[in-house]
Image (tube, rainbow, N blue to C red):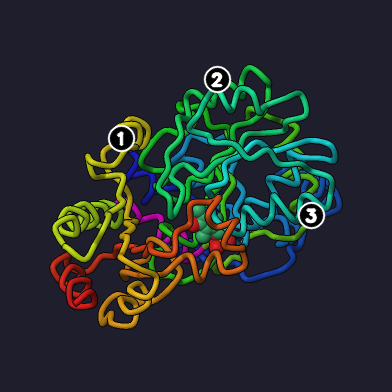
Amino acid sequence: MKQQTKAIHSAFRHPDAYGSIAMPVYHTAAYQFPDAASMVESFSGRSGEPDYSRVTNPTVTYFEERVAALTGAESVVAYTSGMAAISNFFFAVSSKGRNIVTSPHMFGNTFDLISRTLERFGVGVKVVDLTDIDAVEKAVDEHTCCIFLEIVTNPQLEVADLRALGKITRRWGIPLAADTTFIPFTEFDAEALGVDFQLVSSTKYLSGGATCLGGLNIDYGHFPDVTKSLKTELLFNLGAYMTPHAAYMQTLGLENLDARYRLQAANSLELARRLETVPQIKKVGYIGLESNPFHQLAQSQFGPSGGAMITIDLESEQKCYDFLNSLRLILRATNLFDNKSLAIHPYSTIFVNFTPEQKAAMDVLPTTIRLSVGLEDVDDIFEDIVQALG
Ligand SMILES: *Cc1c(COP(=O)(O)O)cnc(C)c1O
């Protein structure tokens, strides 16, 4: 089956008693067994039958299997949020005395997790420019447990060369872990680019309508010890497994992800082109624009579409607040890749707990507005931006 067909048609493990064509929501904590032997089979993980919903649930399993079918992953685990997927991965891969090689450009909470929370457990971080392969070569050492990056950072919109980074991680025998939230995993073959683990905030593109939080670890099975820690240790001990209702909502989102993404990416390209002609906008950031320095690399890695996030730089911080306050259609909100267009001033919100010096080091500027482009008619989105600037 082709991708889009797989996204719609995946068989249930067990036929539904009523022939339901949507996967039922199994809102239960525990499961009954016919006999003691099948309990042993389940608790030892051999039968794959659920025993307790902190670690497995039929509705969540169904969602995970669909994602696995679409990505060719060996296994997929769904979590309560993107941060849960990311933190579980770091707890699996790192230990005291080891270090994570990563970029200063990333989602604020992930950076805080690495530089503050993991630091308390004795895990080090080496912050390096991941677009400078020589610098990465120098940063990795025998204590490095992984290279971690976001495939397109935001709000900086930086793209690193995954194939080149993958060569380094393979030489050291460590995983390349990528937060791929920014471009749907249905758009490109992450494993072929050298990625060993994809971490996704499924809150964003998958959920679409901002209906629920979710996270995914898409695991290509190259590091069995890490997989084992994730599935037989951390799922049990950290308790961050996705809830059945969220899995149901996100399965619905997965079915129309491709159609939504195409429209959002087309809207974004058209909007970015038009915004380049607006005099109050000093700079338009969008990887789908040929003028963007990462355009070619992004296309070679992620395909022809450039995602649905645009940044615009205005004259001053005050102009950013005036702009936000004048919006009539675009919502002032922090989500990304929602069906509705959203705008935020990252400097004063997502990065509010970082000092001005830290923000400068992360290239988070006080003059940047982040736009997440939705499914509205592009004429209306553009008109709202123009009137808000006026
Ligand atoms: C939103 C986001 C996260 C965190 O995901 P949650 O589902 O909000 O926990 C991580 N990485 C990126 C790139 C994100 O945009």
Dot 3, how many residues are within 10 Å of its Cα: few (below 14), some (14-19), or many (20+)?
some
Mark sitting earlier along the chain (3/2): 2
Residue at the disc numbered 3: 236
Q: Quadrant of the N terminus?
A: top left
Mark sitting earlier along the chain (1/3): 3
| Residue 351 picture location, percent across and down | 55, 64
| Left or right: where 164 falls relative to 36 | left
Up the image or down, 79 lies above or below 381; here it is above
Q: Residue at x 66, y 28 (%)?
A: 139
Mark sitting earlier along the chain (1/2): 2
Query: How far apart in space, not on screen, are marks 1 and 2 (Cα)?
Result: 20 Å
Q: Residue at x 82, y 54 (%)?
A: 35
Q: Amino acid at mark 3?
A: Phe
Q: Nearer the viewer, residue 26 or 198?
A: 198
SS at circle 2: helix
| Residue 142 picture location, percent across and down | 76, 23
Foreground disc of the pair 1, 3: 1
Q: Nearer the viewer, residue 113 or 267?
A: 113
Residue 170, by quadrant, is top right
Residue at the disc numbered 2: 167
SS at circle 3: helix
Magenta-tinted stretch: 248-258
Q: Determine contact: label 1, label 3, CB under 8 Å.
A: no
Residue 103 seen: yes
Dot 2, how many residues are within 10 Å of its Cα: few (below 14), some (14-19), or many (20+)?
some
| Residue 32 picture location, percent across and down | 76, 63
